[in-house]
Image: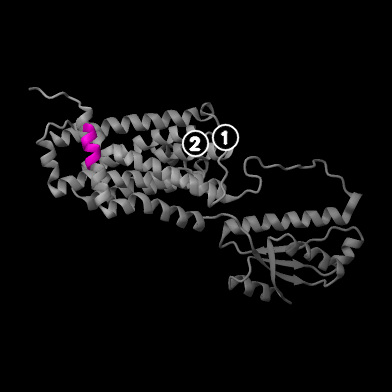
Amino acid sequence: MKQPNFSWIRLWALVKKEFIHIIRDPRSLAMAFLMPLILLILFGYAITMDIKTLNLVVYDQDKSAASRNYLEGFPASSYFSVVSAVESYDGARALIDQGKAHLALVIPPHFARDMEQGRTTQVQLLADGSDANTATIAMGYAEAITNRYSTTHLGNKIELAVDNRLRVWYNPELKSRWFIIPGLIAVIMTVITALLTSLTVSREWESGTMEQLIATPVQPIELFLGKMAPYFVIGMLDVLFSVAMGVWVFDVPLRGSFLFLLGVTAMFLVGGLSLGIMVSTIAKSQLVASQLAMVVTFLPAFLLSGFLYSIDNMPRFLQVVTHVVQARYFVEVLKNIFLKASPPSFVAGDLIFLGLFAGVVFAVALGKFRKKLA
C-alpha cells in the first residue's frame, strides 16, 4: 500500500516525540528557557548608554562670588559631581590622568570683573578624550549649563535670534534602556532559535536515531516540520517571557499592538528556526553545529542589526551586508512596536524582507535536508 506524501498523524507523532525529547533533556530545557532569561538580565543591566555622574575637577583662579555662583550650576544639574578643587593645571591634569575626573573646569582671573563690566569672559574645559563618547556628552552638558548661566546673568541684555524649544518624542527622558531592550530581544531570539534547532538534527545523526527515522514511512517534510514545530512554540514562549520582562522589569513601554508583535515574531521564528536546521544539516556534529550557529547569528545580530550601532554610520559595503541580516528587520520592527506604536504599513519594508528571508531560508533548508536524507 502506497504511503501518502504527507500525513498529519505522522507529523503529530514526530512533534510529540520531539517534545518528549526536550522535556527529558535538561540541557535542552535550560538552553530553551534559562538562556534567554540570563542573557536578557545580563545585557539588559550591563548595556546602558545613560551617563548619570560625571566627575568634575575645578581650578578656580578668580575665587569670587560670581565664579562660585557659576560653579553651583554644575552639581545642581545632577549630572556633575565636583570631586576636587585644585590650585594648578598640574593638579587638574593629575586627576584626569588617574581617571578620577572626566572634566576639568578652569575659571580665569578677573572672571567677576569682566562679567560686571559686560565683557565676554572665557572659561576652559579640559576633557578626558580616551572615552570619546563620555567626553562629548560631558562637554554638551557643561556647555548647556554655561549658556544657562550666561542667559540668567545677562538677563534682557541679549535677545536670541532663534529660540530653541526642544521636545523629544517617544522617549522624552532619552532612556537608553527603552531602545536597547526591544533590540536585545531580537538579538537574543536570533541566537536562541538558531542554536536550538542547530543541535536537533546533528544530535540525531550522532546518536544514530536518524537512520531509524529514515527507515520509517516518515517523509522529509514531515521530519523537517516535526523538528521545527516544538521549537516554534518554545520560541513564542521565550518572546512572550522576554516582552513581559521588558515591560515589568525594565519599564519599557509597549505602546503598539500585541497581536502585531506576535505575528511578526511568528514570521521571524520561521526564518530563524530554518536557519538553525540548515546549519545543523551542514555540520557533522553538535559541537560544530553550535559553533557555526553562534558565528552566523550572534556576531551579525549584535554588530550589524542596528541594535547598538547606527547602520547609517557604517561603511557603505557593511550597510549592504546588513540587508541579509535577519535581526536588522526584527530589531527595527520591535522598536517601532514598543515605542512608536507603528501600524504594519509603517514598517512594510521590514516586514517584506522578514517574509522573504523566512521563505528563502525555509526553502533552502528543506532542500538541503531532503538531500541529506536521500
Q: Amino acid at mark 2?
A: Val
Q: Residue furthest left?
A: 1
Going by the image, does 135 lie left or right of 290?
right
Q: Looking at the image, which residue is at 55% across and 41% down?
A: 254
- Quadrant in which the N terminus is drawn: top left
Per the image, the residue denoted by label 2 is: 333
Magenta-drawn stretch, dominant element (helix, strand or loop): helix
Residue 17 position (above or below residue 149): above
Q: Nearer the viewer, residue 160 or 317?
A: 160
Task: Name the residue rendered at 15%, 23% in the picture.
Answer: 4
Count of numbered circles on the image: 2
Q: Relative to residue 251, is residue 113 drawn left or right?
A: right
Residue 13 left/right relative to 93: left
Vertical relation: 19 (above or below) 356: below
Amino acid type shown at disc 1: Ala
Q: Residues within 10 Å of mark 2 (few under 14, many from 20)?
A: many
